[in-house]
Image: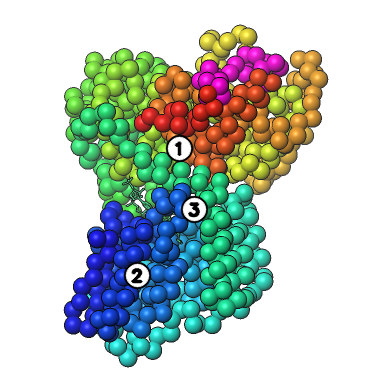
């Protein structure tokens, strides 16, 4: 039974019961429709609808979106609730999202617990509210607020929902509060459909449209939502629902919606593989080595997860820097309203920075985030081995170095695992968990436990230079540098990738992180670089000129006065000069050609990564590229996108590029096999 009904005197209690999140699937829709008929037949005075398990409803069951729609459809069920002679009241606990929030809008009144959230996240799944949300919400909260809620997809807290008029009251016992509403009061409340439609203010619509174009470039659903709201409000309510339904149905099977569903369910599926024993150490006190930008971000993420944190530094200046860094993240979180003063004080109380390794004698996990040097890390691990209990897990946040070599200084290397965070570590959702040659199941499972506590998405990767993400990034940058040398400018390349959907292109991104990191990597790789591989020296020239990125005031771009980005003709000249030295006849690449080269380079590298077993599934690569490297979520991740191009087409283009440079464009044999068999890359590498 997905919906249960119960009568107490003249009140009907309808409970949605579809664990784990009360998704509104066919059985819930049927149950709700039956409940409408039941309440009428019983001549009830009111119905109070709630969700079992402290959760109202997470919205339509998105797993049904791949199939044909099945009756009864949600808009019809909600019309039945709204038109019923028995008034319904929504008692909201947990979340009321998407179709769940739309159920609440069809009710005569809404009471919400103070910790609950209500919202319309449909655009994050590539669709729009499809059960009256686009038309009922503006009638209730006004045009500007409704546009904001629907196009952002962000849920509202109870207090904000109350302020906007979305709910009538906030009460921690919403069912009891719904029962207490006087019948006369309930009887006077006008159904939302009968409220006057707000006046369409073209200036507001234009502003929101512009904001959406800037904030969600390339995304179809938020713009379509604006169109539907605008068109619908000019029509009779019942006709507006037809317009909404038509748009919802079109979007539901669109490429963007499929891609966004793919990422949504892949994120949820990122769990400890069943083949791995699930024993973990218990986490209470964690040692972090290094209080630089990365270490302090990790420390703050751990503090947010209620853990006790000790940052270890090698001298007093390091301790001072760590304290300052963590204090400033706490202050920034306070300023942004993410935490309040008691929460900030409580975090400060759980944090220390010290040079004294004896302070971590009871820590069960260490995360090393020291300088990226094998010698430094090996020293740190030797110290950690002495300081922490024997069963503690020792992890490294290294981005590129060989975890097996780091682990070799420890008597029991099975305790060592890689935990690769992304900056800023307290914000970015991805955690690459690196499995070394000897990493135990316990160490791996502890990595997953930590990811869960930090609310991050874990992806297991194997040892190689750069693991999954940075290895693909290196190939992306190499392809970009080659295009730069052979014919383009950094800004043309950046623009091409922004048009694809990246928030910023490879050069603007490098200016942000600093050109010196990639430079250090190139020097590290000098000894092992394939001499037949083309080497582009432009980035080295930038270092010689002191152009290290934003932090030095100039990188691939100039930042006059520390302000916005300005194209730098000197950089364009540098590329021309190097091309001249190398005797290259430059080509005028179109934006499509630039994109094709950069994307194909990444796709090809990713299939090598799969072939070597460094990543276990194509979906893992999707998670890494979307959550760690800015690949547009609405394209579903690198491998999902590759499948939209098709392996045969990809291989054909790679063959063409290999004529130019057979080393850089060596085609992955597994990609070739997918092309020959016509199979999808995602399905061929689906193992988790
Ligand atoms: C919509 O409503 C359209 C309507 O306007 C129109 C209709 C006509 N469907 O995230 P969790 C699963 S569009 C199916 O780990 P949490 C999830 O896969 C929808 N399944 O838990 C996972 O399964 P498993 C608009 C769903 O506590 C399990 O539930 N609604 C759905 O961290 C637990 O999920 C949204 O976009 C779903 N809608 O977070 C809300 N939601 O155990 C999307 C969850 O097999 N959902 N599952 O791995 C969320 O934001 C979060 O899941 C939520 C819980 C906050 C609810």
Q: Quadrant of residue 340?
A: bottom left
Q: Nearer the viewer, mark 3 or mark 2?
A: 2
Contact, CB < 8 Å: mark 1 with mark 2? no
Query: Mostly what secondary structure, the magenta segment?
Result: helix
For label 2, the residue is 33
Name the residue that disc number 3 marks: 124
Secondary structure type for disc 2: helix
- Quadrant where the N terminus lies? bottom left
Residue at the spot 35% in from the left edge and 70% down from the top edge: 33
Measured from the top left, where is residue 369 in percent x and y?
39, 30
Determine if the magenta segment contains residue 72: no
Mark 1 sits on what residue?
623
Disc 3 CB within 8 Å of nearest ligand 1 atom: yes
C-alpha gap between disc 1 and disc 3: 16 Å
Give the x, y percent position of residue 249: 53, 58
The span picked out in magenta is 657-676
């Amino acid at each position: 039974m997905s919906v249960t009904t119960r009568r107490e005197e003249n009140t009907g209690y309808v409970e949605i019961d579809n664990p784990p999140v009360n998704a509104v699937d066919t059985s819930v829709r049927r149950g709700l429709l039956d409940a409408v008929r039941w309440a009428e037949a019983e001549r009830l005075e009111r119905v109070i609808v709630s969700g079992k398990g402290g959760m109202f409803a997470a919205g339509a069951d998105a797993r049904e979106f791949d199939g044909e729609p099945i009756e009864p459809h949600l808009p019809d069920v909600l019309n039945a609730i709204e038109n019923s002679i028995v008034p319904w009241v929504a008692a909201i606990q947990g979340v009321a999202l998407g179709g769940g929030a739309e159920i609440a809008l069809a009710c005569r009144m809404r009471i919400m617990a103070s910790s609950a959230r209500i919202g319309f996240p449909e655009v994050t799944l590539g669709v729009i509210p499809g059960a009256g949300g686009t038309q009922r919400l503006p009638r209730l909260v006004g045009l500007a607020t409704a546009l904001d809620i629907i196009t952002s997809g962000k849920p509202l807290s109870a207090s904000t929902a109350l302020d906007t008029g979305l709910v009538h009251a906030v009460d921690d016992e919403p069912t009891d509060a719904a029962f207490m509403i006087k019948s006369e009061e309930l009887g006077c409340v006008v159904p939302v459909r009968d409220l006057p439609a707000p006046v369409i203010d073209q200036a507001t619509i234009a502003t929101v449209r512009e904001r959406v174009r800037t904030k969600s470039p390339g995304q179809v659903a938020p713009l379509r939502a604006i169109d539907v709201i605008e068109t619908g409000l000019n029509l009779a309510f019942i006709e507006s629902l037809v317009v909404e339904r038509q748009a919802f149905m079109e979007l539901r099977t669109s490429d963007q919606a499929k891609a966004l569903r793919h990422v949504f369910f892949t994120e949820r599926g990122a769990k400890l593989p069943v083949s791995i024993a699930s024993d973990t150490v218990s986490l209470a006190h964690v040692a972090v080595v290094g209080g630089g930008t990365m270490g302090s971000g990790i420390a703050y993420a751990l503090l947010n997860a209620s853990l006790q944190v000790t940052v270890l530094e090698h001298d007093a200046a390091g301790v001072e820097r760590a304290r300052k860094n963590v204090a400033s993240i706490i202050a920034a979180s306070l300023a942004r309203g993410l935490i309040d003063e008691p929460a900030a004080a409580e975090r400060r109380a759980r944090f220390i920075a010290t040079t004294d390794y004896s302070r971590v004698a009871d820590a069960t996990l260490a995360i090393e985030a020291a300088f990226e040097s094998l010698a430094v890390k090996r020293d740190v691990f030797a110290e950690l081995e002495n300081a922490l209990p024997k069963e503690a897990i020792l992890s490294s946040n290294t981005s590129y170095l060989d975890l097996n070599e780091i682990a070799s200084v420890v008597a029991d290397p099975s305790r060592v695992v890689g935990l690769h965070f992304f900056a800023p570590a307290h914000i970015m959702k991805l955690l690459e968990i690196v499995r070394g040659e000897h990493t135990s199941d316990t160490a791996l499972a502890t990595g997953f436990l930590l990811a869960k506590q930090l609310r991050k998405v874990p992806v297991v990767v194997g040892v190689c230079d750069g693991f999954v993400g940075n290895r693909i990034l290196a190939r992306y940058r190499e392809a970009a540098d080659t295009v730069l040398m052979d014919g383009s400018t950094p800004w043309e390349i950046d623009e091409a990738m922004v048009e694809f959907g990246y928030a910023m292109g490879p050069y603007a991104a490098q200016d942000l992180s600093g050109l010196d990191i990639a430079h250090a990597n190139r020097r590290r790789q000098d000894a092992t670089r394939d001499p037949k591989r083309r080497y582009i020296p432009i980035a080295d020239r930038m270092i010689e000129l002191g152009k290290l990125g934003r932090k030095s005031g100039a990188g691939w771009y100039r930042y006059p006065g520390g302000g916005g980005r300005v194209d730098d003709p000197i950089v364009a000249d540098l590329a021309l000069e190097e091309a001249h030295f190398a005797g290259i006849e430059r080509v005028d690449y179109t934006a499509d050609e630039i994109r094709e080269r950069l994307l194909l380079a990444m796709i090809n590298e990713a299939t090598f990564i799969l072939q070597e077993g460094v990543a276990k599934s194509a979906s893992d690569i999707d998670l890494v590229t979307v959550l760690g490297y800015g690949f547009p979520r609405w394209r579903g991740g690198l491998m999902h996108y590759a499948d939209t191009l098709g392996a045969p087409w990809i291989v054909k283009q790679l063959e063409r590029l290999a004529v130019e440079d057979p080393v850089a464009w060596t085609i992955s044999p597994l990609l070739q096999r997918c092309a020959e068999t016509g199979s999808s890359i995602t399905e061929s590498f689906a193992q988790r």
